[in-house]
Image (tube, helix red, strand yellow):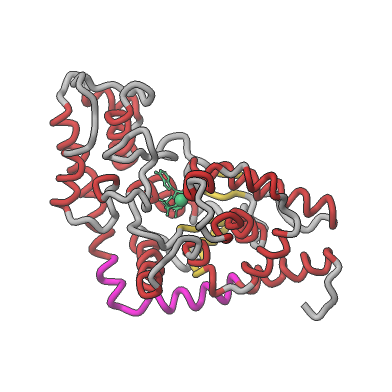
Amino acid sequence: MKRMLSGIQPTGNLHLGNYLGALKRFVELQDEAECFYCVVDLHALTVPRDPDELREKTLEVATLYLAAGLDPKKATLFVQSHVRAHTEAGWLLQCVARMGELNRMTQFKEKSQGSEGVVVGLYTYPVLQAADIVLYQADAVPVGEDQKQHLELARDLAERFNNRYGEVLTLPEPLIGKVGARIMGLDNPVKKMSKSAGSEANYIALLDEPDVIVKKIKRAVTDSENRIAYDPENKPGVSNLLVIYSLITGRSIDDTVKQFEGQGYGQLKKEVAEAVVEHLTPIRERYHELRRSGEVERVLAEGAEKASAIADETLARMKEAMGLVPPF
Ligand code: ATP
Ligand code: MG
C-alpha cells in the first residue's frame, strides 16, 4: 500500500481552494493509501502570528479535517510540532540543501517581495517541508499546483541525501489533481485563491455562512461577454466557477459546460452558489459539533504518538547514515 503525507498551514481561513485542491482529495485517498495528514503549525510561524490566533487556527484546521470526512481509524491526523523529529530532520536536510536551489523558490519570492525584513524561516521552510515528507517515507504527496516546486525540491534533497549517505529515504512524487489543483481568487481570477490574499472577497471560507457564500459568488469577477465557455486563459473567472461547480457536483467539465451553455452569468453564479452551500453546510455543522466535543484533542494526541513512532525511526536512520554518534 502506498504511503501519503500532506499538510495544511493553520494560517487564515481554510478556503474552497484548500478544500478542492487538498482536503477533499485527502478524504478520497484515505481508502486507497496509508495516509498521514498534519496541521503544519511550524510553517505558520514563518510570518508574524498572534499566539492565541495560531492556537485557535491549529485546532480549527484539525477539526475541519474531521468535519470534512477524514476518519482517524483510516488516516493518522497530527500537529507537526507534536512530532519533534520534524525540526531535527529539517536541520539535517538544511545541511543537504543548497542556497542556489532555495533562491529559486517562487513562493519565497512572492511572499517576501524582496524585503530583507522577512524571517529566515520563510526562506528555509521548503526544507522543513521536505523533512515532513521524507520522515514518513511517503511515496506521494497530494497537494495543489502551487506546491509543485517545493515537492521537486523535496525529491531532489531525498535523492542527494541517498547519493551521499546511502539509501535511506523514499523519493516522493507530487500528486496533483487534473482539475481543481489551482482554484483562482474570486476577486482576481488570474491569481490562486489564498488564505493570505488580504481581501475576504478573494475566497469562500469553508466556515462561511450561506448568505456570505451567495454574496461572494455573486460578486465574483467574470468578464463582459456573458457567454459561458471553459477557457481558463481568456475567461479565467467563468472557467473558475465552472471548475468549482464540476468538482463539487462530481460532473465533468464538458457536462458542466453543456449544462450552462446559452445561459447568463447570473444563472451560473446562482447555481454554483447553491451547490457550494449545499456541499459545505454539513461540513460547517459537523465542525461546530466537533469543536465542542473535545474529540479533536484526543485524535491529535493519538495521531502524534503514531506519527512519532515512524518519524523517529527514519530520523535515527538519517543520523546514523550521516555519521552522528548514538544514542539517537
Ligand atoms: P497561504 O496563503 O498561507 O500559503 P494557502 O491558501 O496557500 O495559504 P496552504 O496551507 O499553503 O494554503 O496550502 C494547503 C494546501 O492547499 C496545499 O496542498 C496547497 O497546494 C493547496 N492549495 C492552496 N491554495 C490552493 C488553490 N487556490 N487551489 C488549489 N489548491 C490550493
Ligand atoms: Mg500556501
Q: Nearer the viewer, residue 119 or 78?
A: 119
- Image quadrant containing the N terminus: bottom right
> Which residue is at a point 21% across and 49% down the rendered structure image?
278
Would you say 114 lies left or right of 314 here?
Answer: left
> Which residue is at a point 37% across and 77% down the rendered structure image?
295
Q: How many marks?
A: 0
The question of residue 300 being in magenta is answered with yes
Q: Where is residue 98 drawn, in percent x and y?
A: 72, 50
Q: Nearer the viewer, residue 157 or 166?
A: 157
- Image quadrant containing the C terminus: bottom right
> Which residue is at a point 35% across and 67% down the rendered structure image?
60
Q: Where is residue 273 drawn, in percent x and y?
A: 19, 42
Q: Is residue 4 visible?
A: no
Q: Residue 137 occupies which quadrant of the picture?
A: bottom right
Q: Where is residue 43 drawn, in percent x and y?
A: 51, 61
Name the chief secondary structure element in magenta: helix
Q: Where is residue 7 drawn, in percent x and y?
A: 50, 58
Would you say 57 lies left or right of 219 here?
Answer: right
> Which residue is at a point 30% across and 78% down the rendered structure image?
293
Q: Residue 36 occupies which quadrant of the picture?
A: bottom right
Would you say 23 lies left or right of 126 here?
Answer: left
| Residue reaching furthest to the front | 116
The question of residue 106 being in magenta is answered with no
Q: Is residue 234 visible?
A: yes
Range of residues picked out in magenta: 287-307
Q: Does residue 38 sit above or below 183 in this rendering? A: below
